[in-house]
Image (cartoon, rainbow, N blue to C red):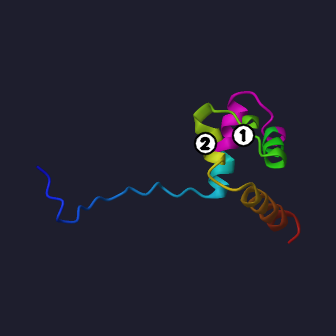
Amino acid sequence: MQDFNNTQYFKVQKENEISVREIISAVFAAMTEKGYNPVNQIVGYVMSGDPTYITNHKGARSMIMKVERDEILEELLNDYIKHNLN
């Protein structure tokens, strides 16, 4: 029988944090592997918010949905500026 007079403790495992850059890279690779045009598909997702633009292959859809679309745009724009305007 359980003792409900004492506080019970449990520890929740944190998911490994993955950067937006790593997510974009993994999604790009999965889309390429499946034969899709990853640029067109990612743009479609960012513009519409419709996750069906992203394949389920290798968990790409669930990965990309872990970050906000504005975070994806911010990462892409920062990378573009870093490599093209400096």
Vertical placement of residue 85 versus 49, above or below: below
Classify the position of the C terminus by image quarter: bottom right
Vertical placement of residue 20 versus 7, above or below: above
* Residue 18 position within the rendered picture, expressed as x and y whole percent measured from the top left: 56, 56
Residue at 67% from the left image edge and 42% from the top image edge = 27
User: Could you tell me what secondary structure mostly forms the magenta stretch?
Assistant: helix
Residue at 72% from the left image edge and 60% from the top image edge = 71
* Residue 9 position within the rendered picture, expressed as x and y whole percent measured from the top left: 26, 62
Residue hosting label 1? 51
Left or right of 69? Residue 64 is left
Vertical placement of residue 68 versus 49, above or below: below
Q: Secondary structure at mark 2?
A: helix
Q: Which residue reaches farthest bottom?
A: 86
* Residue 53 position within the rendered picture, expressed as x and y whole percent measured from the top left: 76, 36
Which amino acid, mark 1? Pro
Does the magenta segment cover residue 4?
Answer: no
* Residue 57 position within the rendered picture, expressed as x and y whole percent measured from the top left: 62, 31
Residue at 63% from the left image edge and 40% from the top image edge = 60
Q: Which residue reaches farthest left?
A: 1
Distance from label 2 to label 1 (Cα)?
A: 9 Å
Q: Secondary structure at mark 1?
A: helix
CB-based contact (under 8 Å), mark 2 and mark 1: no
Of the image marks 2 and 1, the number of the one nearer the N terminus: 1
Span of residues in magenta:
26-40
Residue count near mark 2 (Cα–Cα under 10 Å), binned few <14, some 14–19, many ≥20:
some
Left or right of 35? Residue 11 is left
Residue hosting label 2? 62
Residue count near mark 1 (Cα–Cα under 10 Å), binned few <14, some 14–19, many ≥20:
some
Numbered mark located on residue 21 in the image: none
Residue at 78% from the left image edge and 43% from the top image edge = 45
